Amino acid sequence: MSDRQFWLGFSLVPEIGPKRLSHLLNWFGDLASAWTASEAQLCAAGLDRQPLANLLQTRRTLNLDAEMRKIEAADARFVTLADADYPALLKAVPDAPAVLYVRGTLSPDDSRALSIVGTRRATSYGRDAAYHFAKHLAARNITIISGLAHGVDAAAHRGALDGGGRTLAVLGCGIDRVYPADNHRLAADIVQHGALLSEFPVGTPPEASNFPRRNRIISGLALGVLVVEAPEKSGALITTTTAAEQGREVFAVPGNIFNPMSGGTNRLIQDGAKLVLTVEDILEELNIAHGEVQTSAAARQLAPANDAEHRLLQHLGADPMHVDDLTRLSGLPVALVTSTLTILELKGLARMVGHMQYCVVRTH
């Protein structure tokens, strides 16, 4: 068996997430050894009782070859955290899925991405705004991320496609399913000009508990999140919470104060989200111009985009510094440090020079 199959196997074990998987990989040296280790060896590696029981049970019942065939039958594939084509921004998120199922194509250019989210019960204003921003951002080579739902999501995906750009849809079900089913044609178009993505195994139904988990991927794939229309209690607002935790920018389109569908977006603006009226408002905030993340010397002379970038750049120097040291010195949460470092890399302001080691990029 290839090492990829063991990545798949571990991803199907309850309570073994990226952190435990990374520990097992470091302890045993490779996932094949970890998968075939005895119970005593797994205990010696520090695996807790319940994850250990889950692993032993999964090994007894799971047919890895059959799982691989299921993925192939769904005309899909999967990427792991160890793969070069795993989305770079998402990889920096602490709870990034170890395995991501894909139908379609991933591109390095998808690092220039914006997520667009909002209510399923969008008004014509909400749908038009989502379509407008997505179409014009896609025409500037910005990949549009959303969740394939009715309303704002569908309008954003369609706008990106009509703008001649790329779009990624993150599913709250298995990659072999389309939910809602009447977005089947839209999903097929997305596969041709981007990808459908899911962390859930083939055959997983669209259960309500899946969607909050799905939202962290929607925000994690992008440089920022744009909320177009959302009521005060909306799943879209969960995405803005995870976006803030991940160090992403949050944008909001203002709405009619008499329409409850805009209550959440207007409240986000009151609470500090960036109010946007034009595509340029977003591009300027993210330091994106002419469809490119600025990596020139001119871009490196720009002021940091936010306090997190400013703090990290204060401590980064020519000598490599470990993420743990940057976290201690900056006083920022480790999740915010890792996500901000990835964005600084994309902007050409910092670079990774070893495992979890970063240094500043000099302009001369």
Image (spheres, helix red, strand yellow):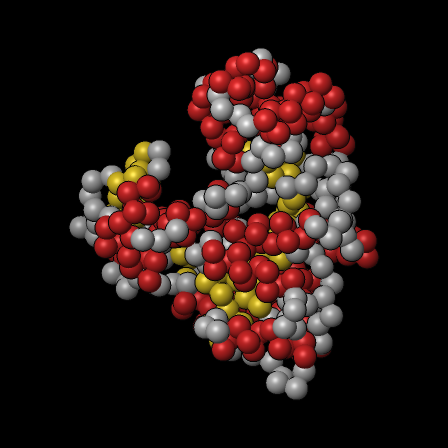
Q: Position of residue 216 (x, y in %)?
A: 57, 52
Relative side of 150 to 315, left or right: right
Residue in the picture at 72% in, 42% down: 174
Q: Position of residue 229 (x, y in %)?
A: 63, 72
Residue in the picture at 51% in, 58% down: 243
Q: In this orientation, which residue lies closer to the viewer: 168 or 203?
A: 203
Q: Which of the 4 quarters of the picture holds residue 13?
A: top right
Residue lying furthest bottom? 258
Residue in the picture at 50% in, 75% down: 269
Relative side of 316 to 200, left or right: left
Asked if 100 appears above or below 54 in the picture, the reply is below
Residue lying furthest right? 182
Q: In this orientation, which residue lies closer to the viewer: 75 or 252?
A: 252
Residue lying furthest front? 49
Residue in the picture at 71% in, 42% down: 175
Q: Position of residue 97 (x, y in %)?
A: 57, 40
Q: In this orientation, which residue lies closer to the viewer: 17 or 105?
A: 17
Asked if 300 appears above or below 6 in the picture, the reply is below
Relative side of 118 to 181, left or right: left
Asked if 281 appears above or below 52 in the picture, the reply is below
Q: Is residue 57 visible?
A: yes
Quadrant (top left/top right/bottom left/bottom right) for the N terminus: top right
Asked if 259 appears above or below 363 in the picture, the reply is below
In this rendering, the count of numbered labels is: 0
Q: Is residue 139 visible?
A: no
Q: Which of the 4 quarters of the picture holds residue 118?
A: bottom right
